[in-house]
Image: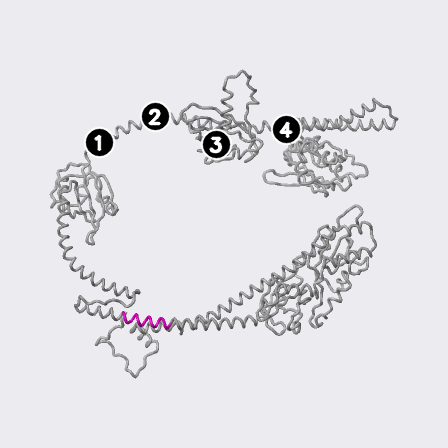
Amino acid sequence: MPPPVLSPSAPAPLPASVPLPIVARWQQAWNGSLRFRLLALGLMPLLVVFPIVIGVLVLLGGERANHLLLSNLRGNLASSRNYLDQVKTDVGLRVEQLVHTERLNQLLSQRAPAEDINEALSTAAKGGGLDFLLIAQADGTVVGSSTGLHKGSRLPPSYVIRQAQIGVANVAYERFELAELAAFSPLFPERIQSPPPPSPHQGTAVRGLLINAAAHFPLAVNSPDVMLVGGILLNQNASLIEHMRELIFPVGTLPDDAEGMAAIFVDGVRIAISRQRQRGMQHIDPLVSPEIRQTVLEQGERWLGKAWLADQLHLTGYEAIRDGHGQRIGMLAVAFPYDPYLRVMGVLLVLVAGLMALAMLALSMLFLRAGHELTTRLRAISSTMVAIGQGNRTARVGTPQYEDELGQLMRHFDALLDTIARQDAQQQTAQRHIVEEASRRRALFEHERDGVLILNPDGSVFEANPRSAALLGYSTTEMQQMHLHDWDAHYSRTELTALLDEVRENGRFLETILRCKDGSTFPAELSMSRAYWSDKTFVLVLLRDITERHAIQTELELYRLDLERLVVQRTKELQDRSEQLNTIFALSPDGFVLFNRRLKVAFANRAFLHMLGLESEQVIGLDENDFSMLLARKSLAQASFPGVAALRATHKKKRQPTDTPAPNAHEQRQLFELAAPASRVIEVLIRMSETATVSQILYFRDVTHETEVDRMKSEFLSTAAHELRTPMASIYGYVELLRMREFDAPKRNQLLDTVSRQSELMSSIINELLDLARIESRRGKDFVLERVALQDVLAEVVAGYKPPQDRHAPTLPPSDMPLWVQIDRKKLQQALLNILSNAYKYSPQGGQVQLHYCHADTEGQGQQVGVRVQDEGIGMTPEQLHRVCERFYRADASGQIPGTGLGMSIVKEIVELSGGHLQIESTLNVGTAVTLWLPVAAPLPETTPLV
């Protein structure tokens, strides 16, 4: 926008003696000259942008560089921690491997002299890179060591030793006092005190930090109960700390040949630090600052920052070292000099600033040259515009010097002037054509066969053709004085106004009743659309008499109603038939699949989809080959679906006449077994159809229960026969032996005792089978239920049970109040006796059998009480625990523990028929706990005493 021109009435400018403010002078020059604006913009990168970019680069670049250095420091700290953890892991693996070496186990089992054990330990410690290796008893008494410890000395308590005492091999960082380290090696106190500890006024005692590992030797008959303890002392461990530094800061990786450092601290006292090749270890405080100690050891957070080490600023990082209990006992530290990085960043900043200054200077010069050319060509365009304004229509800018955007603008400007000249000539010709077109359109409007109305937006007639006036009985002059609602007999004035407002350019059709001037009416069709002419809005209406169409539609409607009646009647008959078939298919527990004449699946009922775990979309539309492949994939390989084509071929073969007698129904069944969604045995049959829509029907029936019952019967009979055959074979063999040979009285009595024991075993199996069969067949109908106290039943069982020889009878648990249950007393005694007998039988090495009462109140089961029988026997694996209640299953596979394998099956049946459940918990070589849960009996109704 050009500056305003001062009018004679405007206030006078300031006198020349009064200087304008610098901002006002800049604004005046900026608004008054494009050349000045281009000059300012050309110098702005050098004078304004360059200082800002340099400042931002210094601030953000320095911050980003510090962030990268701290990230590098985090990586160095993580690498040092990984290295130290790897050393700890290697120590644990070496100790755990040494407890399995044949040499050490042989020395221990043979009770070798202490000198041999010490020599073997010393050799193993040197080979494994360990500072100490010793063998100690469970109480910590040293048996042998690689460091010359006296036999019988005692190890201080520690986390890894306690873990090894319970049989868990472990390794951890552990902190010990100076006196306690001598228990591992006599050389450790001297090693810790050289170099000397910090001065006493610093208030911090020197402690030792060990990577300590312990593992228990495998237990055997001849081997003692001992463990192996070994590890590395981190105090003054120059090889470890130097190796750590070489891994984190290889020589030559830091700028200016700078050197990084690594250190280890116990509490806040440094115990190991890498040596500097150039500066040595002078001026490095052995204690960390209180801020670092509080952040790392007390708060458990990582500390990263700058600190002065050896009179030089370093970037340092500290991270806590935790012992086996998770307590923070020390710190791991890494550091590298900060000054070399500052020098490198300074050099880079100077180079970047110089290059940027040169680039911006060159950019400004190019911009100023381009601005000069731009203003020169703009002046040429301005002078041409002035000539055109003065009446010179032939003035032109001319051919541009460059074909850039401004050159194109100059060409377009000349082309625009040429276009304006041509348009002046064309405008006269266009005006003549407009007059001719208006005359032609007027003729079409007046001679249109349908009525044409041009309405204003409010519904008043703007213009009407003669046909519309003739249809309504008015003249065109009368029509122009009327409104749409004057002759519409169907819609009200309000409805017509709403219809006109809703009409858009895409148009709208509607039917209505029109009233003629003489009062008669006729049906009409209106086609309405909105149009815009000369910035005005109109509604164009086409009017057509549809009286003849209505008569035809009335006749067609009568035909349609009659046809609909016939369709409804036939549809109802088909729906009734379809509903019957759908009901049969939906309620049938068996599956049906129908194929159309193209051998594609047309229907599958819900029973089939549920049986095979499929959705309707997966089946409908499949041809018989894809259908067969789908069922084959869901079947087991050894019992796969035979395929629809095979079923059809078998069906046709059976229908052919033959002299061979037909096989029985069982042999004709086609069976296959599903693998998913559940293991099922399915019988499939095929029926052929001659209807127009169905070609064949497949019938599926779930026979899993039948086959499972047959399998269980066969398996039970086989197992029972096997269990009875074993004692029967012994009885038969010994009886035949007695009949065939003469034995002396002791031998004969021994054989007869064997026959008697096997007879008792066979009788026990038969009795338990009869008990189990009786319980299953009657399902609790013969139970004599009574309300008894659980304590009384348990007391009777314990009193009547005779424990094995040299074993103590179980002690009845205390109970404050009676635990009432509704059960069959004898059946419950039988179940408790079986559980108690198993507890003693399956703990042959002894151990205490304990009895407890239990209480529970669970949602859905109500209040329950129980008896828990716990032993310290051989226990069971999870697989054995899963099968413990199966018939004839016994957890002891050695055959040394007598039994039939039916006891727990009987217990489970009795407890479940009594409304309770059985809970079994077991750990191999630890023991088993069996809990018999029963529902609490309802309280007796209160009675009112007679007065």
Q: Are marks 2 and 1 in contact (CB under 8 Å)?
A: no
Mark 4 neighbour class, 10 Å CA radius: few under 14, some 14 to 19, many 20 or more: few
Residue at the far right in the pictured view: 744
Residue identifier under label 2: 569
| Residue visible at 21% across and 67% down in the picture | 396
Most foreground residue, 52 or 761: 52
- Tell us which disc is closer to us: 2 or 1: 1
Q: Is residue 947 visible?
A: no
- Tell us which disc is closer to us: 3 or 4: 3
Tell me which segment is drawn in magenta.
Answer: 364-377
Q: Main secondary structure of the magenta part?
A: helix
- Tell us which disc is closer to us: 3 or 2: 3
**C-alpha distance separating marks 3 and 2:** 40 Å
Question: Label 4 is placed on what type of residue?
Answer: Met
**C-alpha distance separating marks 1 and 4:** 80 Å
Residue identifier under label 4: 712
Mark 1 neighbour class, 10 Å CA radius: few under 14, some 14 to 19, many 20 or more: few
Question: Is 368 within the magenta?
Answer: yes
Q: Is residue 455 visible?
A: yes
**C-alpha distance separating marks 4 and 2:** 57 Å
Q: Point out the image quarter for the N terminus.
A: bottom left
| Residue 933: image location, x then y, percent | 66, 37
Residue 759 falls left or right of residue 333? right
Residue at the far bottom in the pictured view: 17
**C-alpha distance separating marks 1 and 3:** 55 Å
State the SS at label 1: helix
Most foreground residue, 924 or 940: 924
Question: Label 3 is placed on what type of residue?
Answer: Asn
**Residue 159 numbered tag:** none
Residue identifier under label 1: 552
